[in-house]
Amino acid sequence: MDKKASPEYLGTPNLLNLPFNWSAGPYLGKWLTELRDNGKLWASRCPKCQRLLLPPRIICGICQVRAPEWPDWVQLSGKGKLIEWEKVVAPQMNPSTGKIEPEPYIHGNILLDEGVTFQHYLEEQDETKLKKGARVKMVLKPRHQREGLVTDILYFRLVQE
């Protein structure tokens, strides 16, 4: 049987720029507005399992029941404990901007005081200073620089309490 060589496929690099506006919807939109305008973190609470939903969602992913609307949300302190972290050393694209994030940076998983986890950047870049259970607090951009994005939270800073 005569085997034919597989064809060679060629590609050409092409940067595609498709700016668009994505609707955040009523829950995420209100959450981002509160973050931008008032510097506050909020979570909705599932009426069935009582789990905090951060960011607030219309439906609890576990119970499949509708969560309450604003203003029946829980205000969060923006303070918590560092659970774990990772140092990102490979280039990563920001899905919101399409731009490559500068690296390295440290990304943390934080258990907020109210009992819900949140993932975000850490200010501290020296891993030897990070400890499981270390206290951290949210640091926001100055009010005039906030845009209504999760990146209005600059990072979480280590604090002594």
Image (cartoon, rainbow, N blue to C red):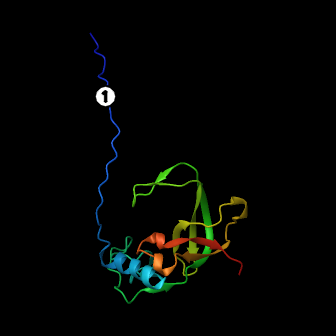
Could you tell whether 122 is left or right of 53 in the image? right
Query: What quarter of the picture does the N terminus occupy?
Result: top left
**Residue 122, horizontal then vertical, whole percent:** 60, 66
Three-letter residue code for mark 1: Tyr
Q: Nearer the viewer, residue 125 or 59?
A: 125
Q: Residues within 10 Å of mark 1 (few under 14, many from 20)?
A: few
**Rendered position, 106 above or below 139:** above
> At x 58% / y 50%, what residue is drawn?
89
Counting labels gives 1
**Residue 92, horizontal then vertical, whole percent:** 48, 52
Residue that sits furthest to the bottom in the current view? 71
Quadrant for residue 149, please give it. bottom left
Could you tell whether 73 is left or right of 120 in the image? left
Q: Nearer the viewer, residue 58 or 96?
A: 96
SS at badge 1:
loop
**Is any atom of residue 1 visible in this view?**
no
> At x 30% / y 75%, what residue is drawn?
25
Quadrant for residue 69, please give it. bottom left
Residue that sits furthest to the front in the current view? 144
The residue where tag 1 is placed is 9
Q: Nearer the viewer, residue 2 or 107?
A: 107
